[in-house]
């Protein structure tokens, strides 16, 4: 039987696998010890499990594997956020950001190496999709960062590289591991999954009643502008996406849905954008989270703070809450839309992104 990465398993699943793989009673007793050392102390490899006899460790190592992503580089911002470039065993690099937040720590983490969705405002979208991450490579980002920074992470946002709902199975498996009481203890309500709008997966998420919070990258509320910014709209038209969001909202028992809106000078801050919000965003309670563009594409310009404030003040009479996101780590390419920026060549940056590109 092939070795299974321990960091991608819940404690029960690890016990089950140990038993199915034929570990004896003593070996099975070691499974929870090894699992807890990894989840709580961030042990970087099975060989580092200090209090387990080396012979018994070898029995475990025949059944389980464990290797955290290697920290290739760290980039600390003036605002105390830190971007981590993490190297996976096959050489793929993914990025994650550790963000301080009122005395707590969040990690913005990646679900894929690269991304196929080619959103125009996003550096990762220019990379194409390298591959999906496995559950242990997702949990491994947080374990490696906790261990390196000597912090305990309380909140997670899947807003790093990749579209989480295109890697739904592994993302949900990782969330189950994060939430384990005897492990990392990150409550499911403290996990946010951001999607560009994979409609069938949104419908499945709503039907399953997951406690994690799903948020939606709207880009723009004008369908033609959204299609320009987010080619995924070719697959699911705006009205179809809105129907799925309304369906998800109905499962939230009065809680608000978060819609992420990209503020782009001369594109998404016009009168027609306000009219489109009024016309299309009906029938559910939402918060509009405005994200000022962090420029990647030479054709898209960032607005000034004053422009964003002036436009957002015109939304106030419409009666829904509006927030303006302060992106962390812009000076270190850690902010929204910037992950992967330093991995791109000048040619990648100059070319328009193409949806569905695999590399
Ligand atoms: S915004 Fe998200 S979905 Fe769009 S290209 Fe970037 S990583 Fe992919």
Image (spheres, grey):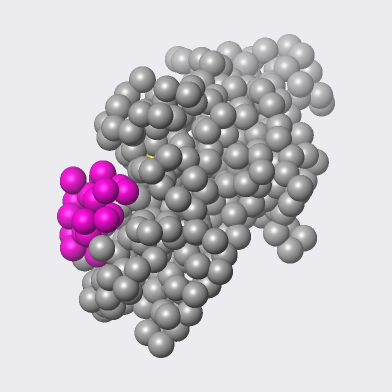
Pick the residue in front: 348 or 37. Answer: 348
Camera-nearest residue between 79 and 149:
79
Q: Within the displayed image, which quadrant is ligand 1 positioned in?
A: top left
Q: Position of residue 273 (x, y in %)?
A: 31, 69
**What secondary structure is the magenta-colored segment mainly?**
helix
Q: Is residue 269 left or right of residue 295?
A: left
Q: Using the rendered image of the protein, determine whether residue 87 is visible from the camera's viewpoint.
A: yes
User: Magenta span has 197?
Assistant: no
Does residue 335 sit above or below 210 in this rendering? above
The residue positioned 76% from the left and 47% from the top of the image is 78
* 189 relative to 73, above or below: below
Question: Who's the residue at 24% across and 50% down the image?
Answer: 227
Q: Give how far across and how far down residue 189 sits, in percent.
A: 53, 62
Dividing the picture into quadrants, the one containing residue 258 is bottom left
Residue 293 rendering spot, x and y as whole percentages: 48, 53
Q: Nearer the viewer, residue 321 or 274?
A: 274
Quadrant of image for the C terminus: top left
Span of residues in magenta: 223-242
Q: Who's the residue at 41% across and 79% down the image?
A: 315
Image side of residue 14 versus residue 280, left or right: right
Residue 10 in sight here: no
Quadrant showing the N terminus: top left
Q: What residue do we see at 32% from left, 48% from top?
A: 229
Question: In the figure, 105 relative to 288: above or below?
Answer: above
Q: Position of 44 compared to 292: left or right?
A: right
Q: Left or right? Give the position of 157 relative to 103.
A: left
């Amino acid at each position: 039987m092939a070795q299974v990465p321990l960091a991608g398993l819940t404690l029960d699943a690890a016990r089950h696998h140990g038993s199915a793989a034929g570990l004896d009673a003593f070996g099975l007793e070691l499974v929870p010890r090894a699992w807890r050392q990894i989840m709580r102390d961030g042990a970087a490899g099975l060989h580092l499990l200090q209090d387990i006899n080396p012979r018994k460790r070898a029995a475990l190592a025949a059944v389980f594997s464990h290797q955290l992503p290697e920290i290739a580089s760290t980039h600390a911002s003036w605002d105390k956020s830190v971007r981590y470039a993490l190297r996976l065993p096959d050489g793929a690099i993914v990025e994650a950001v550790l963000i301080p937040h009122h005395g707590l720590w969040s990690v913005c983490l990646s679900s894929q190496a690269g991304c196929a969705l080619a959103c125009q405002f996003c550096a990762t979208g220019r990379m194409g999709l390298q591959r999906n991450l496995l559950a242990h490579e997702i949990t491994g980002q947080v374990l490696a960062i906790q261990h390196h920074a000597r912090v305990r992470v309380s909140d997670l946002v899947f807003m790093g590289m990749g579209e989480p709902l295109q890697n739904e199975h592994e993302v949900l498996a990782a969330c189950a591991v994060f939430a384990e009481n005897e492990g990392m203890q990150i409550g499911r309500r403290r996990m946010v999954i951001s999607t560009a709008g994979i409609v069938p997966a949104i419908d499945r998420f709503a039907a399953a009643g997951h406690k994690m919070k799903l948020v939606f990258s709207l880009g723009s509320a004008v369908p033609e502008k959204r299609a320009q910014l987010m080619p995924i709209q070719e697959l699911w038209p705006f009205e179809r996406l809105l129907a799925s969001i309304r369906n998800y909202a109905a499962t939230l028992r009065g809680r608000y849905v978060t819609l992420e809106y990209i503020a782009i000078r001369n594109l998404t801050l016009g009168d027609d954008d306000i009219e489109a919000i009024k016309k299309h965003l009906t029938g559910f309670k939402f918060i509009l989270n405005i994200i000022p563009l962090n420029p990647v594409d030479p054709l898209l310009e960032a607005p000034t703070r004053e422009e964003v404030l002036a436009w957002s003040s015109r939304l106030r009479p419409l009666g829904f809450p509006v927030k303006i996101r302060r992106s962390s780590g812009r000076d270190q390419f850690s902010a929204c839309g910037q992950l992967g920026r330093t991995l791109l060549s000048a040619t990648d940056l100059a070319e328009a992104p193409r949806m569905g590109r695999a590399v």
